[in-house]
Image (cartoon, rainbow, N blue to C red):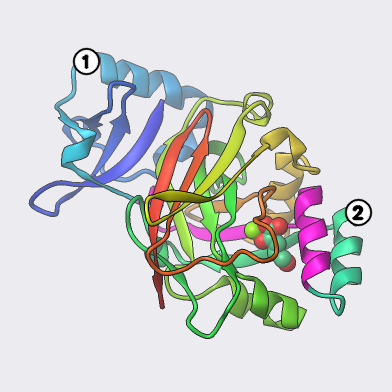
Amino acid sequence: MKLCRFQDASKNIHVGLLAEDDRVLDLGAAGIDRIFPLLEEEEGLESRLAALAAQGLPSLPAGQVQLLPPVERQEVWAAGVTYLRSKTARMEESSFSANAYDRVYDAARPEIFFKSLAEKVVGPREPVGIRRDSRWNVPEPELALVLNSRGRIAGYTIGNDMSSREIEGENLLYLPQAKTYHRSCALGPAIRIGAGEEDARAWSISLEIRRAGCAAFEGRTSVSNIKRTFSELAEYLFRCQSFPHGAVLLTGTGVVPANDFTLQPGDSVHIAISGIGRLENPVTEV
Ligand code: DO4
Ligand code: MG
């Protein structure tokens, strides 16, 4: 079961279910107009949504609506250096900061940083940004945990933690500038409900970057390569913090292009996570 947000031709925003036949079922017909209160239901949610879908809700072909990022009021945070590949890439990026990355990979406390307000997140097919003051920019394809106000995992979506490797590599204290800028976070296309951590750890994550009609980069990893458990990451995010509308937590990247690769305006980023779907965004300079 996949929950989504979409805009109709009159620009009205709806909550829907993205069905396997590529149709979007409108949950507005069942009086549902917000996702985050639904995520508080935890156990009963999947069967409630299945029952609503079986009632025969009005539907539209997904191609006829604009899917929106599946967040409303949740802050988006991100974990880093959760895959060995990320630790290696970070250490190559900066001899200055290498020791910090090496240590955080094995430390009890994970690296967690603020990524985006909900209203700044871009959705499917909207441009993601590369900073014009950075010469080394990459997408980071990541599994995103969708957490309710109690810090429980209510679902999963796809995240793109757009990053400047140049700024991040220059000095660790520049991390917020490397990570949080206009169009630096994409989420979508929908929230997968009803999968447990064991299911999600069997999923694969693939990244394709297309340039002038050709693949400029292709890579993949498995969610099982994440070093930490999801509950450990969620517990640290919610420690001494409160998120009344829940939060989204990106779980880190395990796919990093070679060090001579940088994104260009006009590229497009295609991220697929088996079990969720595909998130595709063109790249623009900001
Ligand atoms: O400090 C660097 C951030 C690393 C990151 O975003 C990741 O591993 O995904
Ligand atoms: Mg990342």
Dot 2: element: helix
Q: Residue at x 75, y 82 (%)?
A: 171
Q: x, y percentage for residue 173? A: 73, 82
Q: Is residue 123 visible?
A: yes
Residue at the extreme left of the image, as rendered: 10
Disc ID at residue 65? none
The one nearer the camera, 58 or 284, is 284
Residue type of the residue flagged with mark 1? Gln
Please indicate whether residue 284 sits to the left or right of residue 105 in the image.
left
Position of residue 283 measured from the top left corner of the image (x, y, whole percent): 41, 64
**Residue 106 disc label:** 2
Other-residue count near label 2 (Cα within 10 Å), few / some / many at <14 / 14–19 / ≥20: few
Residue 272 in the image: state x and y as whole percent.
Answer: 50, 38
Residue 88 colored magenta?
yes
Residue lying at 18% horizontally and 31% vertically, measured from the top left: 61
Question: Which corner quadrant of the image does residue 60 belong to?
Answer: top left
Q: Residue at x 35, y 18 (%)?
A: 50
> Relative to the observer, which residue lies in front, 259 or 203?
259
- Quarter of the image that includes the C terminus: bottom left
Residue span colored magenta: 69-93
Judged left or right of residue 256, residue 283 is: left
**Relative depth, front residue between 167 and 145:** 167
10 Å crowding of disc 1: few (<14), some (14-19), many (20+): few
Mark closer to the chain start, 1 or 2:
1
Q: Name the residue carrying label 1.
A: 55
Residue at figure coordinates x 44%, y 27% from the top left: 45
Q: Amino acid at mark 2?
A: Asp
On the rendering, which quadrant does ligand 2 occupy? Answer: bottom right
